[in-house]
Image: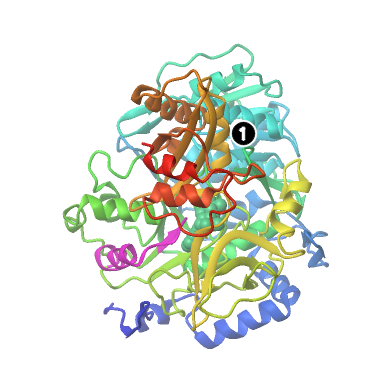
Amino acid sequence: MPDQTITSVSRESRVFKPSAEFKAQANLGSEVTYKRLYKESVNSPEKFWAKQANELLEWRKPFKKVLNWKVPHAKWFADGTLNVSENCLDRHLGTPLENKAAIIFEGEPGDIQTLTYKQLHREVCKFANGLQSLGMKKGDRAAIYMPMVPEAAIAMLACARIGVIHTVIFGGYSAESIKDRVNDCEAKLVITSDGGWRRGKIIELKATVDAALKKGVKCVEHVIVHQRTSNKVTMKKKRDIWWHDLMADSSSEHKAKAFAAENPLFVLYTSGSTGKPKGVLHTSAGYLLGTTITSKYVFDLKETDIYWCTADIGWITGHSYVVYGPLSNGATVLMYEGAPNHPEPDRFWDIIDRHGVTIFYTAPTAIRAFMRWGDDYVKKYSLKSLRLLGSVGEPINPEAWMWYHRMIGKKRCPIVDTWWQTETGAIMVTPLPGVTPAKPGSCAVPFFGVVPKILDETGQEVPKGEGGRLFLTQAWPSMLRTLWGDDDRFKKQYWSEIKGIYFAGDGARFDEDGYLWVVGRIDDVLNVSGHRIGTAEVESVLVAHPKVAEAAVVGRPDDLKGSALVCFVTLKSDKAASDDLKQALRVHVAKEIGAFARPDSIRFAPALPKTRSGKIMRRILKDIAAGVEVKGDITTLEDIKVVAALQASD
Ligand code: 7RM
């Protein structure tokens, strides 16, 4: 394919049009069709979604009612029934897809395993029978704490098959974090692995689960342990069961039951503005429809693709675009267990060439790391199989976009910069690769059924070009339904900023062409290397340390991570500051939350900047952390001298 053309260079950005070749083969390649469909999707959403739901999903009992919307509670296709696992597996059997690879797995040590749709179906059926033999049934919760191995997807799909609600916990989380999540949703079962490979070392997952369960967990009856690394683990009698033992006794026949469209599918915990993570609840048909339709049109998925999304299944991107969306489309999904720089920083490019990956979806923080490691690692590979690139997780800076376009896409592949959230379930704003000209740094235009608005404090729409808060004003099928056990927080967090419409927590603006530019979180959530971390979570861990009196955590712009974590800490009066204590506090946070939350910097200060009513003025701390002049009004500060002391802190 020839280069995509640069059609204009404006002050802000260049514009990259899809090539004629890409357009011609795209699942959606016509601007006229996109416009017509978008119009229909927002003007007659029920008609649009009914048609898509019938075309893209397999129903056991067809729905009659499309949407029941009593703000903020949505029910989609409520009187219809289906089975999500059947939609991802059984429906491809008896078709030419059945002997096609569903999952190509590459472990970090280099082991490779392929599961066809037929084989994956067989494994899922066996595991579903195994879960049932342990008494797991519809509505029960199961926590999954596993590395990126096919068994993680098998566990998710088996839960879905029998109506068990899964909650996947990212393998980087600590024992304490596991305990909180398992207790919050009262999981009866934990599914884990002995370990997982990361940079040549074993991450001891089972040992971490053991530690979590010792911290005061009453709800867990069983732990299923998949053997990955064969490191020594302790198996607690009666409670712990080897995956392979359970599977050995299980039949590979399993008839999936039909469940109501609104049956809960999973809870996924995500950070919010308080210390307590939010359990985002997604249900069945609407979620599956959102992930299926976006996989088809945003990634332009075809039968012949080898599709690779590098996200871990512990995050929403792994749920929607490693498991449910691509499998429902009958795609071949590549799964890689390990680190991008093991044994060398060329591992991803090596994988792409060896497996012939055609679609590659990753995060800006990874792209920036590759840029830093240097072009030589990329140039050793042809990357000629690639035809489409994607980005997700945070705003992609134009420099990184251009490098991705030139170095990885060889100026031939469209890039889809996809904006969405754990809460939205599926991609909301994105270019369509065969239709939308891309601008580096902008996530472009709303997907079908999505109506984004940028509003000011009074709820007025701001003029194009001006920044404000991002809202979604129309209900969509894959929207979160509530927060597990806390519907009040759900209402308050998302639907009360401006009554009755969804507040995304992001700041953004539209440009003159109607393209969306997301700036980033405007609540107390940080995006560190694409991981969502609540400042309040880190603060509560810090103040739990015996030497700490008070703590305030802010983000500092960072070239690689997006945001770096900077913690301002005041010590109890009889405690002395030292470098050792700094290090101890960093280790403390990593231990309590997870290594990905390890603070970049701890600064001891005699006091924190507070208003007279005692509120910490974070914007002052942000400026101080960034090393810039403190801007804006500081007259509300209770003690003005605090600022100078903070600036002098280290
Ligand atoms: C999918 C995911 C959500 C937050 C969101 C934004 C940021 C995600 C983009 C982005 C700019 C993007 N879910 N974000 N994608 N910002 N451009 N393409 O990341 O729940 O973990 O995070 O991530 O701030 O609110 S998430």
Vertical side of 179 occupied by 297: above or below? below
One can see residue 156 in this view: yes
Helix, strand or loop at label 1? It is strand
Q: Quadrant of the C terminus?
A: top left
**Which residue is drawn at the image coordinates 50% and 65% (left, top)?**
518
The residue lying toward the viewer, choosing from 597 and 330, is 597
Image spot of residue 67 (x, y percent):
79, 66
Q: Residues within 10 Å of mark 1 (few under 14, many from 20)?
A: many
**Which residue is drawn at the image coordinates 38% and 71% (left, top)?**
440
Q: Is residue 239 left or right of residue 210?
A: right
Q: Which residue is mark 1?
A: 143
Q: Quadrant of the N terminus?
A: bottom left
Question: Is the CB–ligand 1 distance for label 1 below 8 Å?
Answer: no
Range of magenta residues: 390-409
Q: Residue furthest bottom?
A: 32
Q: Residue furthest top?
A: 237
Q: Is residue 8 left or right of residue 209?
A: left
Residue 540, quarter of picture: top right
The structure's colour scheme is rainbow
How many tags in the picture? 1
Image spot of residue 20 (x, y percent):
36, 84
Looking at the rendered structure, the kind of residue marked 1 is Ala
Image spot of residue 319 (x, y percent):
55, 49
Vertical side of 40 occupied by 165: above or below? above
Vertical side of 495 occupied by 411: above or below? below
Image spot of residue 65 (x, y percent):
83, 67
Does the segment drawn in magenta span residue 406? Answer: yes
One can see residue 355 in this view: no
The residue lying toward the viewer, choosing from 380 and 633, is 633
Q: Is residue 379 left or right of residue 612?
A: left
